[in-house]
Image: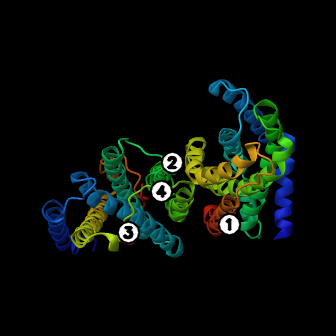
Amino acid sequence: MYGKGLRALSIATVAVMTAALALVFFYAPLEAEQGFLQKIFYVHVPLAIVALCGFIAGAIMAIQHLRTRDPSWDMRSYVAIHMSLIFGVGTLITGSIWAKGSWGHWWVWDEPTLVSFLIVFLLYATYQPLRFAIEDPERQARYASVFAITAGAFVPLNFIAVRLSTAYVHPRVLGGTSSLPGPMALTFVVSLIGIALLYATLCKYELTAKHARAQLRALRRRLMGDGATAAPVRRGRSAAPSTLHPAAMMTARMTGKDGL
Amino acid sequence: MRRTVGALLRKELLVELRTLESVPGMSLFAVTTFVVFHFALNRNVVEGDLAAGILWVTLLFAAILGVNRLFVADAEEGGFDGFLLAPVDRSAMLLAKGLTLLLFLLVLELVAVPAFALLLLGPSLGQALPGLLGVLALGDLGVAAIGTLVAALAVRTRARDLLGPLLALPLLVPIVIGGARASSPVLAGAHHAGPSARWMLTLGLYDLVFGLIAYALFDFLLED
């Protein structure tokens, strides 16, 4: 169920990303003031937008989880937030490089977008420690969802508060795409679609992998009965939900083992 | 609902009066932090931005001490179980705990603000006080709402002393921004300078939104 369409999605991602990179390097004109450096904008801004949308999507999935109590929504929320955190690291690094290039400093405090992104990132960085610290899988999922919703609401609020607090010098692109010259706007939109597809593909891969692992664990348990505890599937350290699919959960319950 | 909240609030205050676990610690912590700031900054008097920053950071960290202890007794001594057995609205607990934290913060400020004026503040407190009170009240509301939600989220985790502050600090950043910006003109010593209305409004909206979020989500934290 989870693996369906993965190949098509992957191919689409590779195609759009290639097109985006080609446009960035060969089609988009050099910006007059910043020159070549400005091209990092085609990576930095889509990364930031996709990461923030991913956080909000995680919150919406968490609402679904609290409403339906379906653990697969918790899994989706976890994957969305996990992937957004990774994209967030990318955003902070590319943002720092850009800031160093255009303003001469790695970090600029009077730039609300960067600062609010950092605060949001610091908040979400506690998501996985929170999951780690709760053992009961059901409670872990519930508390993680409460956190995801609170943090999701915090994202826009924080941006408003930080923006109010500083005079902005950030190059405005969001909502100002029309002010970009045509070729730049086209490149930006293609990059944005490429990064969004990349996000979707990576999320789908993670979901598929987690699902396959849970199924494998359930099958192995069924095959070996109580001996399964002697040879557990290696999980490594992960804060991911341990029960994700109703079928896997039912198998686990039938054999008298919980998701741990 | 009102009776339930009243009963819970009475219990909280009684427990605090008998154990004196939170408020004295918070107040002492705040006063000590002012002394630490004096040495760390090597300043005898502060005013304006710096004064507002020191006051808010100190109050915030002292508040986090209270937030960390807010639900500990309930989690360890079965207060949650007792409450869940009673046929009452669960939001009553949020309200009671939030009010408790608010009262703790008010007592903390009764100690901390005069101590701050005595130890560090350059301009006299008298003319700053009316403006400062409004800002502090709005800030306290937000800290109480966020603090109660975060305390309930963190209390039944393994590393609650660590997770509580980690979760609370980023969520409280906008309150520090709003509180410090709103009170810095008041603490600058200028005549008849009121707190900035824009920041008061921001603080009020933030309080409102997080109050609603806490109200909507608190029930889910109390299910087992």
Q: CA distance from mark 3 to mark 4?
A: 46 Å
Return the mark for residue B14.
none
Return the mark for residue B208.
1
Residue type at numbered disc 3: His
Q: CA distance from mark 3 to mark 1?
A: 37 Å
Q: Secondary structure at mark 2?
A: loop
3 or 4: tag closer to the N-terminus: 4
In front of the other: label 3 or label 2? Answer: 2
Q: Nearer the viewer, residue B132 or A134?
A: B132
Q: Nearer the viewer, residue B101 or B40?
A: B40
Q: Are marks 3 and 4 on the same chain?
A: yes
Residue type at numbered disc 2: Ala
> Which residue position holds label 4?
A168
In front of the other: label 3 or label 1? Answer: 1
Position of A7 relative to B146 (above/below): below
> Which residue position holds label 3?
A245
Q: CA distance from mark 2 to mark 1?
A: 30 Å
Q: Secondary structure at mark 1?
A: helix
Position of B16 relative to A39 (above/below): above
Label 1 CA crowd tier, 10 Å (few <14, some 14–19, many 20+):
some
Q: Would residue A157 be visible to someone looking at this image? A: yes
